[in-house]
Image (cartoon, rainbow, N blue to C red):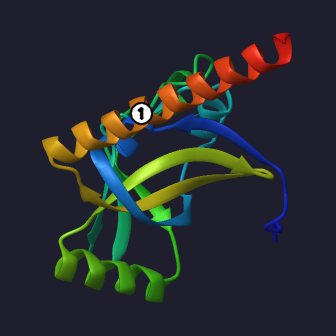
Amino acid sequence: MPERNQPMKVVAVHKKAYHDYFVQETMEAGIELFGTEVKSIRGGGVNLKDAWCSIEGGELLVNGMHVSPYEKGNIFNRDAYRVRRLLMHKREILRLYGVLKQQGLTLIPLRVYFRGQRVKLELGLCRGKKLYDKRETAARRDDQRNIDRALKNRNIGASAE
């Protein structure tokens, strides 16, 4: 059984998710893959841009995740956009289902990484941002950048004296 403190090798990050959503909670899930898909992911052939998760029939599924076909996989390659099953405990899936139905949240894959030999997916329980929220976040980021720049210039000016 792999330990939690093993080193992580991040393969893909869904950066736009942090722009489009407020991430309220994150969790880790395993992912059911075939051998050629694991080899392709190891080479960085995964894209989370349009990916999202759903719960159907008591199973957690990831939709829209693109795993490029493995170059040397020939007939063993699978469809790049096939629906993949995520591996979590049943009670965690049921808790997520209840939260999604009651609060109107969305499950979005945030990162794909290796923990030891296993491919893991970090899921975010997210609430969509409105346009004014996105503008506010951008304005706050610009303000912080200006403050940092002013402090840096002030420190440079003080050391030159």
Number of callouts:
1
x 78%, y 50%: residue: 117
Q: Nearer the viewer, residue 24 or 54?
A: 24
Where does the image place residue 79, in percent across and percent down from the top left?
38, 34
Residue 39 visible in the displayed image: yes
**Residue positioned most to the front:** 161
Q: Does residue 139 appear to the left or right of 27 in the view shown? A: left
Is 161 drawn above or below residue 37 in the view shown?
above
Residue highlighted by disc 1: 143
Label 1 Cα neighbours within 10 Å, binned few <14 / some 14-19 / many ≥20: few
| Percent x, y of residue 21 | 30, 51
Q: Quadrant of residue 131?
A: top left
> Which residue appears at 33% of the width and 42% of the height?
137
Q: Is residue 142 left or right of residue 128?
A: right
Residue type for callout 1:
Asp
Q: Position of residue 56 (x, y in %)?
A: 25, 71
Instruction: Give the residue drawn at x 83%, y 10%.
Output: 160
Which residue is at the front of the view, 21 or 136? 136
Query: In x, y percent, where is residue 29?
Result: 55, 64
- Is 48 left or right of 11, judged from the image as shown? left
Residue appearing at x 45%, y 89% in the figure: 91
